[in-house]
Amino acid sequence: MNERLNVLVVEDDDALRDALLLTLEAAGHSAKGAPGGREALQAMERERFNMVISDLRMAPMDGLQLLGEIHGRHPGLPVMLMTAFGEVEKAVAAMRGGACDFMLKPFEPKALLDQIARYATPPSAEGVIAEDARSRDVLLLASRVARTDATVLLTGESGTGKEVFARYIHDQSARARGAFVAINCAAIPDSLLEATLFGHERGAFTGAQMSQAGKFEQANGGTLLLDEISEMPLGLQAKLLRVLQEREVERVGGKRPVALDIRVLATSNRDMAAEVKAGRFREDLFYRLNVFPLAIPALRERPGDILPLARHFLSMHGSRDGRALRFDAQAEAKLAAYDWPGNVRELENAIQRAVIMAPANVVGQDQLSLAMPTGTAANPVPQVEPAAIASSGASPANIRDLERQHILETLAKVGGSRKKAVELLGISERTLRYKLAQYRQNGDGIPE
């Protein structure tokens, strides 16, 4: 295997445990052994493992009990159990309890290595950059849930790449040959969102000159991504819930339901539990969508991804101009030290600007225009570019104030045109309306 993994082997038979450790180390992995469940849990407190391989019959803590403890403390960590032929019923119970698989003793070394490759290493995919250990863990979870038809709710800050992970789930699923249809619930006016989702019949409303299949029908046999689901109006949420429950959709103005065979994924950059509590999102729909929650960490929480992503974007945007570009050491240090409040989206924008500004084939730190340079990634100290301070007369107190300042300056720059502003800001018009309304409520003097 190409990837070196850290595997924990839990086996009370010393000879067998040593043999398994030798097999794993000979294959290039790092392997640790534990004679029982308690020792295994202690080892997991000291270091991070990619996978646990445990015997089923042990005392005083058996494999099933250890499995439960691991799932409580380290959800998502793959656990495979080893069992003798007569304990297959217990092994099946372990599978129901969350074990990724079980192996019957005795087994060949290659069979063990194949199982580790299957469950501890997420399949690679074009365009998916995940080098940081935390990203690899999320990608591994995504690959595991992809094998099922479970509905997945992907959450995380704006710009973290939730749609990339959603597409990865589709590509690794049995529906990969079907359509992947994404709809941004925040980008479509409320009056058109229902017809866009569910489709409409001819004459259903003014301007409906022909029948049109909605996104649900277009995704039949594949996957539908409801991007920014928290922006969906409450009235439409009730209709969406019925579609998810009944697995059929009725077009606007139609009388005949259309059966659906789709997998539904949803994303949000908000705290969905808080949205439910505030009455802005239906509780029953939340639980329907939150079958398998998948939290995508912010870029500052997975620093091992920053430079691989930056190099990927540099190659991608440079090749469009026919240029083979690279960063110098100072530029890479600057990229790694920045806190990236706008996450992967901000990183790509910064690299695209650097490609334009680079006079030669080497991108230096002077070509990296970052809005808020920080001292170190571990202890960021937000600062503002001199130009921004000069235009406002004061330094923003926090990231929220900086965001408000940036939005208002962009609006002023385009003469108040919201359409032009959202293009420059990279947000939806609905999000812009929402933020302007917040500023008005805070007494910022924003005109209607």
Image (cartoon, helix red, strand yellow):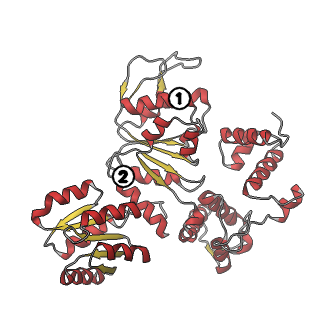
Q: Earlier in the sequence, mark 2 or mark 1?
A: 2
Q: Foreground mark, 2 or 1? A: 1
How far across and how far down the image is residue 331, in percent?
A: 67, 75
From the image, tell me which residue sits under label 1. 236
Q: Is residue 331 left or right of residue 408?
A: left
For the residue pair 268 and 314, the one nearer the viewer reads as 268
Is residue 424 in sight in this rendering? yes
- Which quarter of the rendered picture does the C terminus lie within? top right
For the residue carrying disc 1, how many other residues have a C-alpha within 10 Å: few (<14), some (14-19), or many (20+)?
A: few
How far across and how far down the image is residue 216, in percent?
A: 43, 33
Q: Is residue 340 left or right of residue 180?
A: right
Q: Amino acid at mark 2?
A: Ala
- Which quarter of the rendered picture does the N terminus lie within? bottom left
Q: Amino acid at mark 1?
A: Leu
Image point (56%, 17%), residue name: 205
For the residue carrying disc 2, how many other residues have a C-alpha within 10 Å: few (<14), some (14-19), or many (20+)?
A: many
For the residue pair 411 and 285, the one nearer the viewer reads as 285
User: How many numbered dots are placed on residues in this image?
Assistant: 2
Query: Of the numbered discs in the image, which one, if any, rests on residue 146?
Result: 2
Query: Against 160, is 327 above or below?
Result: below
Image point (40%, 52%), residue name: 169
Q: Quadrant of residue 140?
A: bottom left
